[in-house]
Amino acid sequence: MIARRVLRLRAQVGVVPGLAVIQVGHNQVSDLYGRSKQLACEEVGIASFAACLPEHASEEEVLQLVDVLNADSRVHGILVQLPMPPHIQLDKVLRAVSLDKDVDGLHPINLGRLVLRGLHQPTFIPCTPLGCLELLRRSGVQIENKHAVVIGCSNVVGLPTALLLQRYNATVTVVHEHTLNPAEATRKADIVVSATGVAQLVRGHWLKKGAVVLDVGTSAVADAEADGGYRLIGDVCFEEAQIVASAITPVPGGVGPVTVAMVLSNTFQSALRFFGIATDTSDSSFTTDSHVILR
């Protein structure tokens, strides 16, 4: 368990790993995942620093905050909560995060190293794609020689997920908004990863019988009977897909918790590097029983 490792690190160096989450403005999904990261940090003993700015904060204010966190020795990981307001250039913010603290692996250099196989390895791999691969591996899903379809081509999830699946020797097709007949392309897949944020885009007839489905997308929809007046649903129509799929992740409670686990793991590994302690990559999936959330 990561909590025991954090305790051992504290006994060695007198401090615990620290994670700062930068959030600008509020939306229902971001607020939920921000709270989940904070609670997860508390559960395992990692220090959590909420760095929240108002919606109208300027790009310069965000960059100044990143500089402060880069220089803060208590902070070993910096995560930029997405989405950001449209007046802020996300790429500029991600480039400003120190490579040594980029625990979400979204700095252009880390993403570039993920592309260039066999050369420099990324300091960190993006947490959601890493979580998807961890779910597949721990659930015993064969990736090599399988056909995978990734729906969505964002730099945050779609692209790095496709690259990781290729590293595990899957044949990968990326479906995006300009793909003709996406349902036909998706029906050929043994593994489907959907990360568009379009509620219930993927229907049961999109899927091949026995496909494994990872639903990364999360949308908040109004529901007067739910707590807070809304509920979360995924890219995939779960009721239809579960009839066809051999395994599927629900929303909420599927890929999200594994993503948080990867954030904590990367933050812990970053702290080890900071203190010059040999990193341990043997337990990147330390908190999640994947057989509970991939069913």
Image (tube, rainbow, N blue to C red):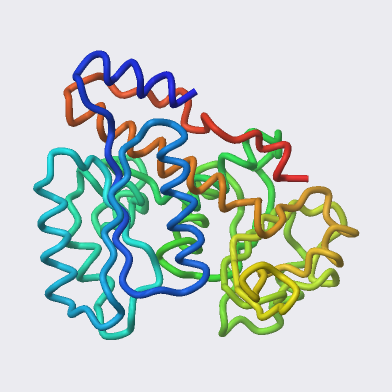
Query: Up-down: is 121 above or below 268?
Result: below
Name the residue located 60 percent from the left edge and 48 percent from the top edge: 170
What residue is shown at x 11% (from left), y 65% (from top)? 64
Residue 241 pos. (x, y %): 82, 63
Q: How many marks?
A: 0
* Nearer to us in this view, 85 or 216: 85
Closer to us: 267 or 161: 267
Q: Is residue 187 rendered to the left or right of residue 21?
A: right
Residue 142: quadrant of the picture: top right
Q: Camera-side residue: 262 or 95? A: 262
Residue lying at 30% horizontally and 55% vertically, measured from the top left: 50
| Looking at the image, residue 260 lies above or below residue 53 | above
Relative side of 103 to 277, left or right: right
Q: Position of residue 199 (x, y in %)?
A: 66, 76
Q: Position of residue 224 (x, y in %)?
A: 72, 79
The residue sitting at 38% across, 31% down in the picture is 45
Extreme residue in the right direction: 243
- Quarter of the image with the C terminus is top right
Q: Is residue 207 left or right of residue 170?
A: right
Q: Quadrant of residue 17?
A: top left
* Residue 230 at x, y percent in the picture: 65, 74
| 279, above or below 34, in the image | above
